Image: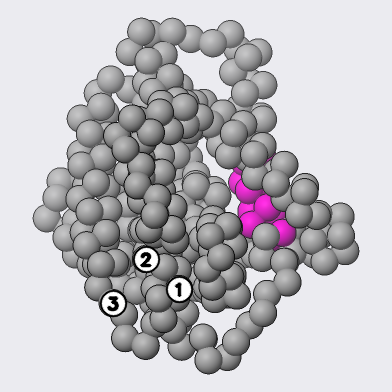
Amino acid sequence: MTQILIELQGTILVYLAIGFFLKKVHLFTDSSDAFMSDFVLGVLLPMSVFVSFLKAFTRENLIECIAILMVAAIIEIVVYLITKWKFPKFSKDEMCVARYGLLVSNGGLVGTPVIEGLFGAAGVVYANVFLIPTRIMAFSAGESVFNPKIHRNAKEILKALVTNKILIAVFLGMGFVFLNLKLPAFAMTALSNVGGSLGPMSLMLVGSLLGRKIQFHVSDAVKIIVLSILRQIVLPLILAFCLIPLNFSFELKVTMVLLIGMPIGSSCAVFANKYHGDVPFASTAVLISTLSCTVTLVALMPILERLFA
């Protein structure tokens, strides 16, 4: 399994490099990044999720998905409480980046291709059920981290959730399974092929976003490394040890731990820019976190194989 992950990480680095290069030669622009973000998040990811549910979700594993959701919700609550602490030597704007970075990972754009590469359609099902609380947190608390004046009421949060294309795809896929509905073979093939482009497209998009001009300050490096270690090593290991006594499959435990260890969400820099936060710090944090995850995920796998064997 470790060797498979190493090969996956190599592939991911190539996709990131392609996106980065295309941004540097101006074939990818800020406007094309915006279009690709909408296309990946609004079309490819929901389509991939929907097809994965049709392929791998059954009535029998509903209980398992409910358990995944409960574990994910508990984790998100615990992390939210952790982000209430003031990290030493972090300024107010840097703390906004740290809080958002711990709460919202890049589990969708980076995590989904990794889990799909390891465990196929079943992994995508597990991943997207596990990411539901993270997506709820992104809508309910994500923006308020950078702009405390924002207080979304329950109606606004509910509206954001019921119109979220990925969550719609999750419940639509479940509905098809429980109603025993099937798509024609040609439609299933077409949707599978389109959704199958999620990995390359999403990772090239991340590479393009990393290709934006970043003002790197050496003095920030230590803080960002500490944040990345907490996000990508400490939290996953804590979760791994908590999962040992639970009667989950190896694939499910690994999926949850690796998703917790994903890099800081690229939307962190977007929100920092939108609400006049510390954009250089946020951008550098996303860059370092994304690149370092290719190492930290591989380092985690042998540990997980020993713990969950």
Q: Is residue 288 above or below residue 267?
A: below
Query: Around disc 1, counting alpha carbons within 10 Å, would you say few (fewer than 14), some (14 to 19), or many (20 or more)?
Result: some
Is 127 on the left or on the right of 212, as rendered? left
x, y percentage for residue 8? 56, 58
Label 3 – label 1 distance at C-alpha:
12 Å
The amino acid type found where label 1 is placed reads: Asp
Q: Is residue 307 visible?
A: no
**Whole-Å distance between the Cαs marked 1 and 2?**
10 Å
The relative height of residue 210 versus residue 32 in the rendered view (above or below) is: below
List the single residue furthest toward the left: 245
Label 1 sits on residue: 93
Which residue position holds label 2?
Answer: 99
Q: Earlier in the sequence, mark 3 or mark 2?
A: 3
Tag 3, which secondary structure?
A: loop
Please identify the quadrant where the N terminus is shown: bottom left
Q: Earlier in the sequence, mark 3 or mark 1?
A: 3
32 lies above or below 4: above
